[in-house]
Image (cartoon, rainbow, N blue to C red):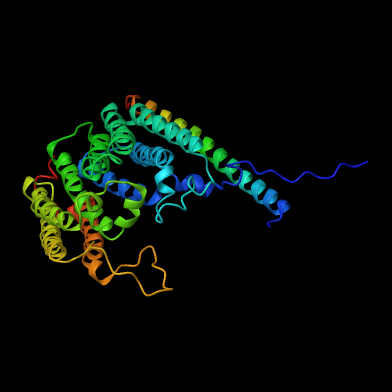
């Protein structure tokens, strides 16, 4: 039979990994939207 | 007095690692989708802001991943019955189907929305159509109902080149649809060759793949017919100006090899019931019996063929190679 403490530790590690992935995805999303905005805005600035 | 510690209860989905969620996106299929979409994008021949080009590729990858997650959420019951798929995250119990469904919907909506806002709405509409076609027409409707499932459903896998082309140019010309047609006619021989040596799995799961419903002999004949259509179709871009001399050579040699292998397969007994193995020797999932080797050979060759065709186009349309004079005559001017 597997040790419940091991299973709890493994579940905690897995949760930490999932949280890190979600945080990375959210930060990446914000950065992408920011960069797209800058690119689109600069495309509409007439060259002098 | 201290109460005794309660045994830990691990809820479903609690043990899922981030890699399990990543696997729902079918990364290997995603890489092929990105490759063909990138080829379409480069072949469009329009200068594109590199950041927006990267965003377009990211959206196509996310859209492919989202539709794969939707497919896995719906197909968990049949995935659990097949040896090839029973270790996937949902049938193995590591991820809940509802979580995969949510991931698929979020990725699909965001990929289409960002494609529309950042790139253009034609590419976004084509991407949305691709996702819906795979998730609804193929997964929900065709896969469990007809042996033509991968023929019609193959359109979803064939569309990425036109999505990439539209992302770069805002247009979807005939040349882009020619690339779609090549992948479309490539799909049946490729997947039926695979199913000829894994049809036992499909039969167990009740998926009406062609060898299960019509038999191996009919499948082998149909593979040959599709290969005979695909080989000349593969040559067509060389005559519309999309492909140059490198492409022509690759398409001619590759097409000939494909037809020869398909003819060899048609004359073989691949997919016929094989005698049982000696007692005590289990059959591995990807063990290929001698009689089924022509099917395995065609499966591998078709992958190489498609990769070589698109790689030839990609190489010919990159500025460095174009400057060496190997670029197609018309392709550079459009």
Against B76, residue B128 (above or below) is above
Q: Residue furthest left?
A: B239
Observer-nearest residue: B313 or B147?
B147
x, y percent for residue A31:
49, 35
Q: Considering only vertical position in the picture, is B43 above or below B252?
A: above
| Residue ranking furthest to the right | B1
Instruction: Give residue B28's position: percent from left, percent from top.
Output: 37, 52
Residue B243 shows in the view? yes
Residue B155 at x, y = what percent?
A: 23, 40
Image point (48%, 45%), residue name = B90
Looking at the image, residue B134 sits to the left or right of residue B81; the answer is: left
Q: Is residue B67 found left or right of B155 in the rendered image? A: right
> The C terminus of chain B appears in which quarter of the rendering?
top left
Determine the image quadrant of residue B1. Answer: top right
Q: Nearer the viewer, residue B164 or B325?
A: B164
Q: Which quadrant would residue B154 be assigned to in this image?
A: top left
Mark yes or no: residue B323 visible: no
**Residue B130, position as x, y percentages in the image:** 29, 35
> Which image quadrant is residue B287 in?
bottom left
Report how many numbered discs are placed on residues in the image.
Answer: 0
């Amino acid at each position: 039979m597997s040790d419940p403490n091991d299973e709890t530790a493994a579940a905690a590690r897995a949760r930490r990994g999932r949280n890190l992935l979600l945080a990375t995805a959210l930060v990446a999303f914000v950065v992408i939207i920011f960069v797209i905005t800058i690119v689109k805005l600069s495309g509409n600035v007439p060259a002098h | 007095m201290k109460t005794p510690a309660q045994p830990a209860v691990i809820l479903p989905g609690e043990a899922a690692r981030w890699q399990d969620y990543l696997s729902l996106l079918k990364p290997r299929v995603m890489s092929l989708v990105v490759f063909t979409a990138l080829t379409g994008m480069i072949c469009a021949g329009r200068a594109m802001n590199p950041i927006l080009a990267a965003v377009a590729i990211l959206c196509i990858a996310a859209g492919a991943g989202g539709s794969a997650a939707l497919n896995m959420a719906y197909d968990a019951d049949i995935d659990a019955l097949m040896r090839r798929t029973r270790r996937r995250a949902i049938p193995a119990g590591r991820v809940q189907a509802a979580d995969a469904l949510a991931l698929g919907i979020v990725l699909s909506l965001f990929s289409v929305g960002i494609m529309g806002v950042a790139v253009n709405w034609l590419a976004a509409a084509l991407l949305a159509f691709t996702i819906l076609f795979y998730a609804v027409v193929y997964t929900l409707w065709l896969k469990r109902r007809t042996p033509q499932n991968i023929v019609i459903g193959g359109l979803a896998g064939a569309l990425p080149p036109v999505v990439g082309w539209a992302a770069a140019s805002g247009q979807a010309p005939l040349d882009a649809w020619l690339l779609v047609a090549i992948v479309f006619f490539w799909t049946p021989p490729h997947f039926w060759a695979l199913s000829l040596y894994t049809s036992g799995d499909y039969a167990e799961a009740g998926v009406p793949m062609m060898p299960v419903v019509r038999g191996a002999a009919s499948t082998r004949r149909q593979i040959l017919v599709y290969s005979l259509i695909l080989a000349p179709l593969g040559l067509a871009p060389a005559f519309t100006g999309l492909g140059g001399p490198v492409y022509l050579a690759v398409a001619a040699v590759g097409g000939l090899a494909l037809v020869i292998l398909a003819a060899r397969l048609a004359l073989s007994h691949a997919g016929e019931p094989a005698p049982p193995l000696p007692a005590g020797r289990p059959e591995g999932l990807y063990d290929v019996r001698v009689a089924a080797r022509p099917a395995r050979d065609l499966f591998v060759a078709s992958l190489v063929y498609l990769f070589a065709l698109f790689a030839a186009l990609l190489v010919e349309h990159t500025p460095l190679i174009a400057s060496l004079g190997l670029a197609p005559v018309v392709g550079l001017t459009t």
